[in-house]
Each structure stands twice: as structure tokens, then as C-alpha cells.
Image (cartoon, rainbow, N blue to C red):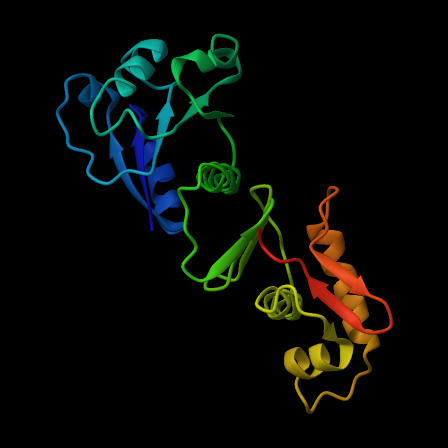
Amino acid sequence: MYHVLLLSDDAEAKKLKAGLTEAGFTTQLVETKAVAQEEFAPGRLDLIVADLSHTSLEPAKLCHVLKRTPGLKDAPVVALVTEEGLKRLELAWGIEDFLVWPTTLSQVVSRLKLLLWRLDRVELQNGLKVGELAVDFEKYEVYVNGRLVELTFKEFELLKFLATHAGKVLTRELLLNKVWGYDYYGGTRTVDVHIRRLRSKLETGRRTYIDTVRNVGYKFVEPA
């Protein structure tokens, strides 16, 4: 569970808080003036989302306060800014990342998770991370470079079996039996089709996650 401090003076911020909570974050919503006056104790904290478009303080001053306050200064900050506010934004304020507001909840969640992975603050209890690929076996979620990738159930099960046997060469027959079941009467061509679909969704850059072993089968790359 990731702990997020949402700083905003916007009455609509409760909707964002609810959305982050639904996405799996433990979210604490606090008004920005409370930070300056040190009127709250943050407790465990993984990330700060600062709504710089709705703050009673000057954005630069708010960021300065965050970076000198015990319990807050070590947490990465993601700023929410309007198009106009973006022109005045300076990363020298100590901001790790920013989002132009308004945007979709899914975009916010993806960006926060990407930042957490990049800073090694997320430890998957039942999953793995290889390069820009992150797989959560419990939530059935796959991310590439922080972007949620939609997989079918069989695609996910195939990826999971490959990933949990990283470095081992797996034959098409074995994959067919383990993923589709011994009572499945389809041919091994089914495996090839699903592998091709997985690659098209996961290997969007130069990174290869699934190797083809000619005349044998496939192998998932070993995590570093």
C-alpha cells in the first residue's frame, strides 16, 4: 500500500482523493496552509501530490516549505499545474515530476506508480520488474514505462508463467499445457500467436523481454 499526501485547497480535491484511494493508495488530503503552519503529522509517506493550481501559498513557497519540513522533505513531489501555471514552474523548486491539470485519474495513477518504481519506493510483494516492465501478479496489472498495458487473461497467464521461469527455455508444448491446460486440443500455433501479441504490447522500444529459441520455444529474460 502506497501512502500519498495530497495537498490542495480545491473543494473538488475530494474526488481525486477518492480516486487515488480506489486505485490502491492510502491518501491523506490536507490544505496547503496546514503545511506552512505545521498543523499535522504526516506519518509514513511515499509521495506528495501538490496541487499548485489551488493553493493559498505561492507555489514556489509551498515547495520550499515541503523541502525543509521534517517528515516531508525526503518525499518526492508531483505537482499538478494548469497550462498557465506550467509556464512559471521550475524544477529547481524540488519537484520530481508534474502533470498538467485537469487530466484523467488513470493518467495520474500511472504517473505516480512510474515515479515510485523509478525511485525504487515500490516493492512488489508478488511480482517482478525488468527494465521498464513491471508485473503485479496479485492485481493482474502490467505496466510498461508507467503505462498500464491491457492484456487478455491468457496473455497475462502466459506472461506470468514465462516470467516465473525466467532464463529457462520453455517448449511450445509445455506452455500450451501449463497455460491452456492438458485438455486443450488446440495446436502449438496458439502459443506463437499469443507470444506475438505479448511482444507487440510489451516491447514498444528496443528492450526485448521474450526471446525465441529456434526450433524449441521461448525464454523470458532474467531480471538483473
In the figure, 8 relative to 110: above or below? above
Horizontal and vertical percent for residue 5?
Answer: 29, 34
Residue sitting at 30 percent across and 15 percent down? 62
Residue sitting at 47 percent across and 12 percent down? 89
Name the image quarter holding residue 186: bottom right
In the figure, 209 relative to 95: above or below? below
Q: Residue furthest right?
A: 215
In the figure, 27 relative to 213: above or below? above
Q: Is residue 219 left or right of residue 14?
A: right
Q: Which residue lies furthest to the left in this view?
A: 39
Q: Which residue lies furthest to the bottom in this view?
A: 183
Name the image quarter holding residue 58: top left
Horizontal and vertical percent for residue 92?
Answer: 43, 12
Q: In this view, does 218 lie to the left or right of 1?
A: right
In the figure, 167 relative to 17: above or below? below
Residue in the foreground of this view, choosing between 70 and 152: 70
Residue in the foreground of this view, choosing between 11 and 173: 173
Residue in the foreground of this view, choosing between 183 and 102: 183
Residue sitting at 42 percent across and 21 percent down? 95
Name the image quarter holding residue 154: bottom right
User: How many numbered circles are shown?
Assistant: 0
